[in-house]
Amino acid sequence: MSKRFQRWAETWIEENIHPGANPDIESHETRAKRLTERLFAEAALAHFSNFETEEERERIASLVLAVVSDSTDFDYDTYTLKYLLAQENEDGD
């Protein structure tokens, strides 16, 4: 597990992916797949090794999908679920 790559990927996601895109143009899954491939292409340009990136591929792909699928409208049930998950994972996010 590469903490350096994880931090880089989380920063990349925050800077490059905006939640709530128009799903009429492409599905969330298609957009997430496209952006995940772009993230890993840029990771290679940032000199991360295949070993560092491949072991995180599945986790990063699910993280990208979560951000892409997140809507900009406030949903109390989603807020409650995210709060409970943050408490369970003890990461505070």
Image (tube, rainbow, N blue to C red):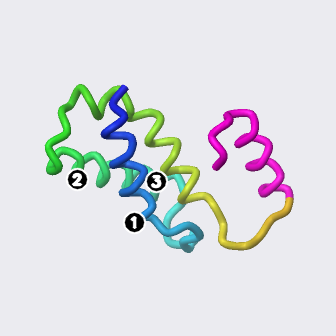
**Residue occupying image coordinates x 59% and y 70%:** 20
**At which x and y percent is residue 39?**
31, 52
Q: Are marks 3 and 2 in contact (CB under 8 Å)?
A: no
Q: Main secondary structure of the magenta part?
A: helix
Secondary structure found at label 2: helix
State the residue at coordinates (54%, 71%): 21
**Label 1 or label 2, whichever comes before in sequence order:** 1
- Find disc 2 in the rendering and name its residue: 42
Say which quadrant the N terminus sits in: top left
Q: Amino acid at mark 2?
A: Glu
Answer left or right for 85 relative to 30.
right
What residue appears at the point 77 percent right and 49 percent down from the top-left corner? Answer: 83
The vertical placement of 66 against 21, above or below, is: above
Query: Label 3 is placed on what type of residue?
Result: Ala
Which residue is identified by label 3? 32
Residue in the foreground of this view, choosing between 21 and 89:
89
Percent of width and height locating residue 76: 85, 62
- Disc on the earlier residue, 3 or 2: 3
Span shown in magenta: 77-93
Helix, strand or loop status at disc 1:
helix
- Say which of marks 3 and 2 sits in front: 2
Q: Earlier in the sequence, mark 1 or mark 3?
A: 1
At x 45%, y 42%, the residue is 61
How many C-alpha atoms fall within 10 Å of the one at disc 1: few (<14), some, or many (≥20)? few
Mark 1 or 2: in front is 1
Residue 7 lies within the magenta run: no
Coordinates of residue 74 in the picture (x, y in percent): 77, 70
**On the image, numbered disc 1 is attached to which residue?**
15
Q: Amino acid at mark 1?
A: Glu
